[in-house]
Image (cartoon, grey):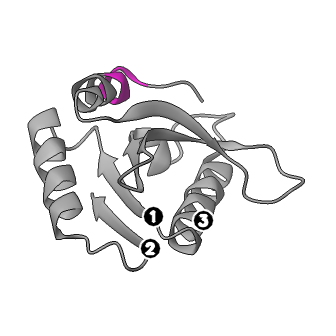
Amino acid sequence: MGSSKAERNLARVLHAHGFRRNYPVSITKDSKPINIDIFHFAKHVWIESDGRWHFMQLKDGHEFAAAQAKDAAIEQEAIKRNILLIRVNNDKFNIDEQLAFIFMHMNEWDGKAGKVVKLY
């Protein structure tokens, strides 16, 4: 699935803080890499900007179960790799609310264990 306008706007703002877009992560040796929406290598932070297709079946042909499985795989991999994974609902919360949530959790995270936090 391509990126949404909301995801691109969030990435643009976070770029000034050292974040980049589309980090491919291989979950297993044989699997196709999964792209992380926004990431920061030095801070060990991944951000997933989730729109409606992550929360409900939208139309015929939308592989909702596959999207949920991918989201779960990303969460498990973040914990395994000692990453702070921040998921934000870009449909429900505006960019200022998303940024406040992101920076709050980055500041609070001690970096000792992988963690998943959600602004849903």
* Label 1: few (<14), some (14–19) or many (≥20) C-alpha neighbours in 10 Å: many
- Farthest residue toward the bottom? 112
SS class, disc 2: loop
- Farthest residue toward the right? 30
Asked whether 17 or 119 is in front, the reply is 17
- Farthest residue toward the front? 42
Q: Are the residues tagged 1 and 2 within 8 Å (C-beta)?
A: yes
Residue at left 63%, top 62%? Answer: 73
Question: Up-down: is 114 above or below 120?
Answer: below
Spatial separation of the CA atoms under disc 1 and disc 2: 5 Å
Residue at left 10%, top 49%? Answer: 100
In the image, the segment drawn in magenta is 4-8
Amino acid at dot 2: Gly
Residue 98 quadrant? top left
Amino acid at dot 3: Glu
Spatial separation of the CA atoms under disc 3 and disc 1: 8 Å
Identify the mark nearer the N-term, 3 or 1.
Answer: 3
The answer to whether 8 appears left or right of 97 in the picture is: right
The residue tagged 3 is 77
Question: Up-down: is 43 above or below 63?
Answer: below
The residue tagged 2 is 114
* Label 2: few (<14), some (14–19) or many (≥20) C-alpha neighbours in 10 Å: many
The answer to whether 64 appears left or right of 8 in the picture is: right
Q: Are the residues tagged 3 and 1 within 8 Å (C-beta)?
A: yes
Amino acid at dot 1: Ile
Identify the mark nearer the N-term, 1 or 2.
Answer: 1
Asked whether 11 or 63 is in front, the reply is 11
Position of residue 66 measured from the top left corner of the image (x, y, whole percent): 68, 51
Disc on res. 83: 1
66 in the magenta segment: no
